[in-house]
Amino acid sequence: MAELANIPWNLILPILGLQLILMIVALIDLIRNQRTNGPFIMWIFIILLLNLVGPILYFIFGRRQA
Amino acid sequence: MNVLLEATGLSKRYGEQKAVDAVSFTLDAFTATALIGPNGAGKTTTLSMLAGLVTQTEGSISFEGSADQEIRSHIGFLPQYPKFFPWLSAIEFTEMAAKLSGLGAREARAEAQKTLEFVGLGKALNKRTGTFSGGMKQRLGLAQAIVHKPKLLLLDEPVSALDPVGRRQIMNLLKELQHQTTILYSTHILNDAEEMTDQLLFMQHGKLIEQGSLNEFRQRYAEPKIRIEFEGAEETQRFEQASPWKVELAGAIGWIDLTGKQVSMSDVLALLSSGRYGVRKVEKQSASLEEIFMKVVQ
Amino acid sequence: MKGFSVLLHKEWREQVRNFKLLWIPLVFIIFGIIEPVTNHFLPQIMKSVGNMPDGMDFPWPEFAPKEILVSLMGQYQSIGLLIIVLAFMGAISSERKNGTATLLYVRPISYASYFLSKWTMINILVLASVWVGFLAGWYYTAQLFGSIPAADVFAFLAAYSLWIIFVVSIVLALSAWLPTGGVAALGLFLTLIMAILDSVIGAYWTVTPWKISTYASYILMGSMDYPTFWKAAGLTVFLIILLVLFGSYMSGRNAAKTTV
């Protein structure tokens, strides 16, 4: 537990928070748009599981315009 | 009549292939012209050249008597499948279109709203175009083409992609615009062309093979016939034997071909009454555009 | 410049509603924070993961604050450029391909204002992203390593911005010229790969846009030979102007290729 207390949360939290925002924005866009290049479910997993890279991949490759 | 646009010897070559080959025609102001032809005849390429999208390989286009006008300032264009930025609403798109065609900010807003209401999108003004159905897109496409009141309206297959109801509705809108502006529209559906046209242009394999008004075409190509509906098939046969003219038979119906013959309606009626036939209906028929088209193409 | 402000407004709406205005700055900020934080904790991380025998002290280099910003720039020179090229490769070519450009091209717009509206908006977005990313990195560096004078940071950012504008100009000029696939390939080559090649084999020439990022780091460190920098910057500005002219011309020439 001492290890956990040593982690400087005040430094790490902003990073985690921003990544969470990025992930949520990607998910909102995905669900609202409904159209993707490739399977819809796959992109949900990519966004949720690949930290930081997942949302970027979705915005660049997964998003499809009508 | 005032000539609005004159195309002289318009050609477009893509490599070896001639998409449009030496096409010449004039559009009179406030008339509607139908550009008819099968798929791949060069209709879209012709319209694209007039719209300033594609530069012709040869030939010239003169607008209001001048060849070096910025023609894009005077036209409204509706592609066969109009595509919109899905993240803009109908009113935002139409307003942008109006501004790009030179309307001031306030005028653009007012005209955009008015035009969208005219095409029946009054309830969808603020909806994103990405959510629009095919019929709504066609209406929006029409709205963006007319919002700036262009002198020439170019429409590429304006109703071909629509279901019968949508087709009827758009056709009615177009008829409201007829004679308010000059319209050139392409179609491969001849019934549509028959409905709204002062001039017909027939295209095939990139060439303009015939042009004229619908009446001129009828006189030139039509084979007028007299159609007689009898009460039964045996009556038809009896008439055929008595008739000095050749009669085509189909059950209770007989046709007399009038082409090149000196047969008048009263002659036919006289014969009918003399033989005491049981007749339901007698009428003179002129050829439909469909039949004319088949003849022109052959 | 007919239609410039109308088209600029359209570009703005596009970036807002496609979330690019949100996700691109966010990504640059995240990298801006991660860089100083990981560098700060790297010795500890190595120690806990690295199974090193007790008593052995790994001589971890002490980073100067400015070196953190330079290594953040290294991130932007790889992942950052990749994102810029891929996010904007279709700016013109996809509009042409999917046919949305058709209804713009049949209006009396000038292709220069069409191209410049995109060039302006995308530059604003990308520069803002790079700047907030570096500002976040600067703040964290100041907390973890020590402060850097603001004048040095801003001089560095100004120089690096010139390189970013050059990159955006390349991507857009290519997008006006080629289909999207070609933009991606040639775009990555002309920015990311060329910058690496220039730093590896370009020891004999100094006046090149691909060294501007290196020069920006020299400016930060205070070791830049300014006459050389100004020559390279002048050439870069000249090439940017050429790219804008080429892009405007190609937008018009390729208007016929739009899907009707």
Image: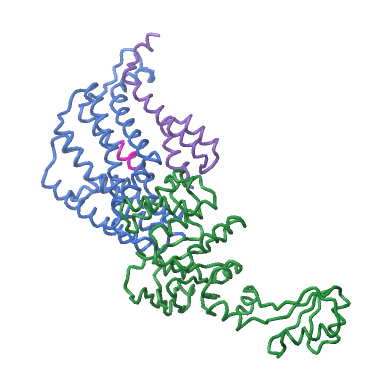
Chain colours: A purple, B green, C blue
Residue at 81% across, 78% down: B249
Residue at 62% across, 74% down: B289
Q: Position of residue B183 (x, y in %)?
A: 47, 68
Residue at 37% across, 55% down: B98
Is C67 situated above or below B162?
Answer: above
Q: Position of residue C212 (x, y in %)?
A: 21, 45
Quadrant of the image containing the N terminus of chain B: bottom left
Horizontal relation, residue B200 to residue C190: left or right: right
In terms of depth relative to the viewer, which is nearer, C116 or A40?
A: C116
Is C222 situated above or below B136?
Answer: above
Q: Is residue C78 magenta?
A: yes
In terms of depth relative to the viewer, which is nearer, B161 or C158?
A: B161
Is A25 situated above or below B156?
Answer: above
Q: Which image quarter: residue B202?
A: bottom right
In terms of depth relative to the viewer, which is nearer, B242 or C97?
A: B242
Quadrant of the image containing the C terminus of chain B: bottom right
Q: Position of residue B268 (x, y in %)?
A: 77, 85
Q: Main secondary structure of the magenta part?
A: helix
State the extent of the magenta-drawn residues as a range.
Answer: C75-82
Q: Position of residue C64 (x, y in %)?
A: 20, 26
